[in-house]
Image (cartoon, rainbow, N blue to C red):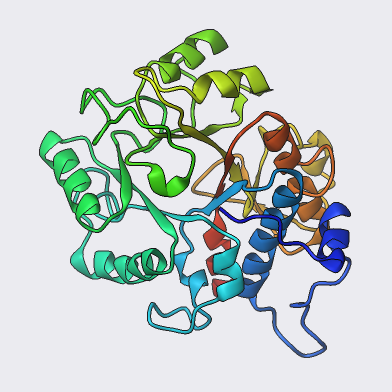
Amino acid sequence: MHGIKLCFAVLLVVMTGCSDKNPNEPGPGQSRDYREDMRIFVRKVNSYADSLSPGFIVVPQNGNELITSNGEATGPLETEYISAIEGMGREDLFYGFNQDDVPTPAAERNYMTGFLDRAETNGIEVLVTDYCSTRIFVDSSYQMNFQRDYISFAADRRELNDIPSYPANPYRANLFDVTDLCDAQNFLYLLNSEQYISKNQYINALSSTDFDLLIIDAFFQGTLLTNADVQTLGNKVSGGRRLVLAYMSIGEAENYRYYWKSEWITDPPSWLGEENPDWPGNFRVEYWDPGWQSVIFGNDSSYTKKIIDAGFDGVYLDIIDAFEYYEDN
């Protein structure tokens, strides 16, 4: 957990949402540093959230290369970025990199663990989501992640739309209160609530589990969960409190979110780019742009503010690796 660590100058920035000046803004003839742009963005989200809810948890998913300045696992640490996050998510570490329910190639696995181990060594909790459904692979995923001190979830569907039936109980289930990310032994990652016919059914299904940590969408089929909903979800069925994090994509805009405007299709803001061909409804954004960042944080209608008002313990940030798209294009 990070505490209140704001001097007057920083407080002025976070309370106004974002500074007009980006310290990473390239000068004439210079190219953007897309990785540093993303680090700055994550740090701003953290500072804003922490000013409103001290101890608010920030966990970026993927884009693990951002923890070092040269993008190498053994490179110099980006200490400001590391100090802004409590955890680091990773998909497909042991299963699912090339195909769901297929072991990840050793070379890819070893590349990723280089960054993940470095993060763990520096006090960052690692959360791994493997995509596998064959029981022997599920067991293997949990065991291999545990051996590396990672918290893990074996998702049986890439859509993240169900609570897996196997194992019947969460891996290493316990009755203890979980008030810090490092206390968690397991987690559930469920983003798509389409199979639930009502919010009550959805809340009851999640509440009837013993996971130490829930990573869920802040909205149920377009409606923001209430503070009472989130408080209910914060109780494990067998006793003890747990953490509840809200998913939030900051590297792409989603046309099914409350902030989306229909006129953007024909008259898009300057920071809105093309649709991601792999994920219909998701659009590239110039994530360093103040216009897009004001959608995410800094004002009462921003995504982060809604998540905080709903009582979530933190955010799980997605499309952190958007820098790869801009570096390649």
| Rendered position, 20 above or below 90 | below
- Give percent across and percent down for residue 113: 30, 66
Q: Quadrant of residue 153?
A: top left
In-image side of 296 versus 250 (left or right): right
Task: Say whether residue 119 is visible.
Answer: yes
Q: Locate the C terminus by quadrant.
A: bottom right
- Give percent across and percent down for residue 151: 33, 47
Closest to the observer, 224 or 149: 149
- Give percent across and percent down for residue 25: 78, 77
Q: Single out the residue that lies furthest toward the bottom.
A: 29
Task: Say whether residue 226 is visible.
Answer: no
Closest to the observer, 97 or 309: 309
Q: Give the residue displayed 33% in from the left and 34% down from the top.
A: 157
Q: Give the residue displayed 77% in from the left and 42% down from the top.
A: 265
Closest to the observer, 319 or 246: 246
Q: Give the residue displayed 43% in from the left and 69% down from the top.
A: 122
